[in-house]
Amino acid sequence: MKTFFANILLALPVSLGLILTGCGKDDHELNTNLTPVSRLNAPVDDKYIKLQPATSATVSFEWDQARAEDGSLVLYEVVIDKDGGDFSNPIAKITSDGGGVQNKLTLSHKDLNSIAGKAGIAALATGKLKWTVNASKGYNIQPAAESRTIEVERPNGFAEIPVDVYLTGDATEAGADLAQAVKLKSTAPGVFEIYTSLKDGKYKFVDRNAGTPTTYFIDGAALKEGGESTQSGGTKVYRLRLDFNNTAATITEITAIGLWFAPENGIMYDLTYTTNGTWTFENKLINFYQESWGRDERYKFRVSVKAADGTAGTEWFGSSNADNSRPTATTPLSFWELRPIANSDQYNYCYKFASEVDGKNCDVKLYFSPDKTYTHQVIVR
């Protein structure tokens, strides 16, 4: 037994030496060798693409697989440059489908339109983009053996539509402090508007209220990047509407807003603009109209407007319902929301005052504020 344990002890140093020697050698060195992509397959060289960024249209970039020497996965990215570029400073690098594993990239027209804009291709213009594919394994990145071009036609509109838009400048209610810029209301994808007053001075629109934002300005009926607009002729109240999809802008002066009392077929009281898209009248007597069948309390709002060319017009704001019941304490807030209505007849799409309004002095406030749903209040004194 003593001899057995002695043999074990004598063998331990040898075994430990073998183990330590084995640990000191790396039998699994990373093999990063690969052959690059040999051929691009789609789109065909110089393919013409009329971009439609407002749709779900896409372009499919496809290529032959690269081969790793050890048979493992290869990652891909599509590299896009200006026509004539050498890819040393590309406009875009985009990982292929499947997190970079697939030898295919599905790129939306929206993203391609943005890339074309960065390449200097103007709205409504046609230009070329050059593309190739990088294959990589570890730190080894290999460009494809060939490159191709595509020819794209950009639509009217900005390559990148801002998520948010703000109004700033010394002509605005908030002044020229960028941090105090007033956010516009988004009414549809790429469309923004604001009801506000402008005094004499400069104003512009920005895509953020900090740092160095992209700026936009109104030039006639066009919305352009960079620069400022000028307000002159004294302080006026406007609705400014910007459509980034079509580089269009509309300036509408709001000359008056009145509470239209339907049974009298006329304006009961005019409302006065205050600030931040708010109109109001205060402490005014409201009497319902006596009909043979009872007391009539229907009302809506008439807005007098003037286009940029001086043409006068009328707009109507009322209820989403053609007819209503008198509101009560349990009526949802949506009852008072302001909806543009095409029907300007005497009675349809009117609100109704609550019963307690009859014979009382009231405040009425209209809120065309950018930070909330357009709505109004009737406050009994």
Image: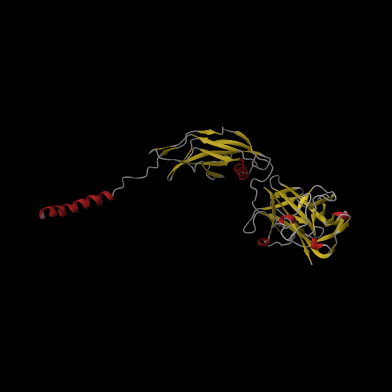
> Looking at the image, which is closer to me, 171 or 277?
277
The quarter of the picture where the C terminus appears is bottom right
| Residue positioned 87% across, 58% down in the render | 289
Residue at image point 75% right, 62% down: 275
**Left or right: residue 343 compared with residue 29:** right
Position in image of residue 134 (x %, y %): 49, 41
Closer-to-camera residue (120/287) = 287
Side of 28 relative to 158 (left or right) = left
Say if residue 161 shows up in the picture.
Answer: yes
* Residue 165 percent location from the top left of the image: 67, 54
Closer-to-camera residue (350/240) = 350
Give x and y (percent) for residue 325.
78, 54
Q: Quadrant of residue 337?
A: bottom right
Q: Return the x and y of residue 55 as percentages of the image width and height.
A: 64, 40
User: Can you tell which quarter of the image residue 31 is in?
Assistant: top left
> Can the viewer see residue 90 in this picture?
no
Residue at 24% x, 50% y is: 19
Q: Quadrant of the N terminus?
A: bottom left
Frontmost residue, 338 versus 136: 338
> How many labels sit on residues?
0
From this viewpoint, which residue is outermost toward the front?
293
Rendering colour mode: secondary structure
